[in-house]
Amino acid sequence: MDRSDYARTVGRLTEDMKRVVEEQRLAFVATVDTDGTPNLSPKGTITVLDDDHLMFADLASPRTVENLGRNASIELNVVDPVTRTGYRFKGRGVVLGEGERFDQLVASYAAGPRAVARPTERIRHIVVVELERCLPLISPAYDSGATQAEISEQWETYFTRLWAERRDGHRNRSSWT
């Protein structure tokens, strides 16, 4: 993805958008709360349904589902923390809680990279996002002229150190540059 894609608004997912969603497996989902403020909630079951729809499972999302019942507006952000790029997906959330289509979508979480343990017991709803706009997210780190390889190296080094310290039980990051 480059800056020339920034102004692009589409109603269809590109291959790169699909790749990012499938690789990252985590989205931050915003809905509108009763008082008009944003409700932001992480979703670890985000996946591509088809060229025009994303979906996620409601495992513990009562506020998200409640908000969508009043106002279907939804935005999802999916970001690759190493490249500092990703996408904003805006659209309308449709909540499914029963019926043949709901059962089919729940069954899709029974195996594979998005598998949910005991999906028929745990998944309360499926939220299907009808996409209206898809926009790239690009970190201001690129404004300096840094390449994706340079940004990736910086953040890969950071996360490698962080994970090593967690594994080794250390928390001193003061020596990091």
Image (cartoon, rainbow, N blue to C red):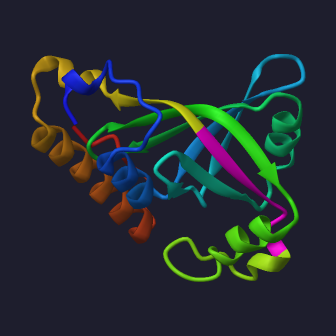
The image shows residue 19 at horizontal and vertical percentages of 34, 55
Where residue 155 sits: x, y (%)?
Answer: 26, 45
Per the image, is 12 magenta?
no
Q: Quadrant of the N terminus?
A: top left
| Image spot of residue 50 (x, y percent) | 50, 55
Please tell me which residue is depicted at 62% across the width and 40% down the height of the picture.
130
Main secondary structure found in the magenta portion: strand
Quadrant of residue 40 within the rendered picture: top right
Residue at 64% x, 44% y is 129
Q: Is residue 128 magenta?
A: yes
Q: Is residue 81 visible?
A: no
Identify the residue at horizontal 19%, vertical 18% (top origin). Answer: 143
Left or right relative to 5: residue 29: right
Measured along the vertical axis of the image, is residue 166 above or below residue 146? below
Name the side, left or right, on which 150 lies relative to 130. Answer: left
154 on left or right of 108: left
Asked whether 148 or 2 is in front, the reply is: 2
Name the residue nearer the viewer: 146 or 73.
73
- Total of numbered circles in the picture? 0
Instruction: Point out the stretch of residues depicted in magenta.
Output: 122-130
Taking 9 as reference, is 170 above or below it?
below
Residue farthest front in this picture: 100
